Amino acid sequence: MLEGNSGRVAAVGRIASSAALLVVAALCAGASPAVRAAAGSGDEPASWVQREVNFRYVGFTTKYSCDGLRDRMRRILLQLGARADLRMSGYGCVGVNSPETSPGVRIVMYVLQPAGATAAKTVTAHWKTVDLLADRDLLDAALDCELISQLNRDVLPLFAPRHVDYSATCSAHTPLVGGTRLKADVLVADAAPPAAASH
């Protein structure tokens, strides 16, 4: 008789548990698509923020022309998630398409930052691991040592990076193979943003 009562109690417990699961499932099904997408999708609300920097390169092992530095910096900034409408102009240049002692580039760009609670306009973004030397062999990476060192100090912080993996062992006129790397997680937009209005 006691065993029969225990069996009924266990059965009632299982029924109650099943009913609770059905209620939770129904609530989830009724949730808005945005809420369901945000749960576990890894998407991150972010805001475009304007950043300006005067980047002056000083190197002894590798030298750039103003155009060469500007083109290289544009590729790097886009890799890091800068919006495509960034504006760049060279300064401190003497020659035409010739290596300079300390060429510079003025940069005005929009970068993604994690959206605060009061952000008026956000876009959906995700964290992406970027290796700025992935397309370079070990010798080329070593030749970039001075540039990578200055990028890590002056430019990368503008992107609110995380998990930065950096090394730059630079020696003037002597590339040190294997001593240069720069990887970081940065926010990139899920889709191309609409064309920005003129500012």
Image (cartoon, helix red, strand yellow):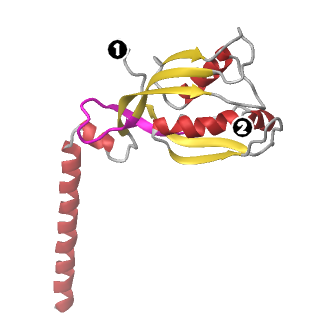
> Can the viewer see residue 25 in this picture?
yes
The quarter of the image holding the C terminus is top left
The answer for how far apart the CA atoms under marks 1 and 2 are is 35 Å
Q: Nearer the viewer, residue 22 or 36?
A: 36
66 up-or-down from 49: above or below: above
**What's the residue type where badge 2 is placed?**
Cys
> Can the viewer see residue 133 in this picture?
no
Which class describes the residues within 10 Å of circle 1: few (<14), some (14-19), or many (20+)?
few
Q: Secondary structure at mark 2?
A: helix
Given the current orientation, which residue lies at the most extreme right position? 174
Q: Which badge, 1 or 2, is on the more N-terminal residue?
A: 2
Magenta region:
113-129
Which class describes the residues within 10 Å of circle 2: few (<14), some (14-19), or many (20+)?
many
Q: Which residue is mark 2?
A: 145
Q: Nearer the viewer, residue 42 or 97?
A: 97
Spot occupied by residue 13 in the image (x, y as percentages of width and height)? 19, 73
The quarter of the image holding the N terminus is bottom left
Q: Residue at x 70, y 36 (%)?
A: 146
Spot occupied by residue 149 in the image (x, y as percentages of width and height)? 65, 39
Spot occupied by residue 195 in the image (x, y as percentages of width and height)? 38, 14
Q: Residue at x 74, y 42 (%)?
A: 170
Q: Which residue is mark 1?
A: 199
Residue 134 placement, left or right of 11: right
Q: Nearer the viewer, residue 36 or 92?
A: 92
Q: Quadrant of residue 14?
A: bottom left
**What's the residue type where badge 1 is placed?**
His
Q: Is residue 138 magenta?
A: no
Q: Is residue 128 magenta?
A: yes
Spot occupied by residue 105 in the image (x, y as percentages of width and height)? 57, 21
Q: Residue at x 70, y 17 (%)?
A: 65
Q: Secondary structure at mark 1?
A: loop
